[in-house]
Amino acid sequence: MVDQLYDTAYECFEGVRATARLLQDPAWSRAQDAAGLATLVAALSDRSIRMLGGLRPAESEQQAIVDGEAAG
């Protein structure tokens, strides 16, 4: 499951990277609505950050299991 989470996080960051490349294209950027672009960038960034933040507790829980097994 952790591998799937990492894969999903990687894909989200690839989306952020692709969006950044599109934003560097002046012709494409000018053709877009500013509010739409802001929403897109915010959604991609927020989703990626939340997903990475969600991985930290999983590592802590895994360490607690390892520590519990060593004590038991």
Image: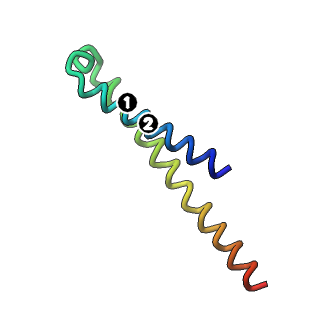
Horizontally, residue 3 falls left or right of residue 33, namely: right
The x and y percentages for residue 65 are 71, 72
Does 42 sit above or below residue 52?
above
Residue type (three-letter) at the residue carrying disc 1: Ala
Does 62 sit above or below residue 55?
below
The x and y percentages for residue 12 are 48, 38
On the image, numbered disc 2 is attached to which residue?
Answer: 14
Is label 1 in a helix, a strand or a loop?
helix
Horizontally, residue 34 falls left or right of residue 2, namely: left
- Going 30% across and 29% down the picture, which residue do you hit? 21
Q: Please rate how many residues cluster around mark 1, counting C-alpha atoms within 10 Å: few if below 14, some from 14 to 19, many from 20.
A: few
Q: Are marks 1 and 2 in contact (CB under 8 Å)?
A: yes
Q: Please rate how many residues cluster around mark 2, counting C-alpha atoms within 10 Å: few if below 14, some from 14 to 19, many from 20.
A: few
Residue sticking out furthest to the bottom: 71
- Going 27% across and 27% down the picture, which residue do you hit? 23
The x and y percentages for residue 45 are 40, 41
- Going 60% across and 47% down the picture, which residue do you hit? 5
Q: Quadrant of the C terminus?
A: bottom right
Spatial separation of the CA atoms under disc 1 and disc 2? 6 Å
Residue type (three-letter) at the residue carrying disc 2: Glu
Does 39 sit above or below residue 61?
above
Q: Which mark, residue 32?
A: none
- Going 43% across and 33% down the picture, which residue do you hit? 15
Does 70 sit above or below residue 36?
below
Is label 2 in a helix, a strand or a loop?
helix
The x and y percentages for residue 35 are 31, 25
Residue sticking out furthest to the right: 72
On the image, numbered disc 1 is attached to which residue?
Answer: 18
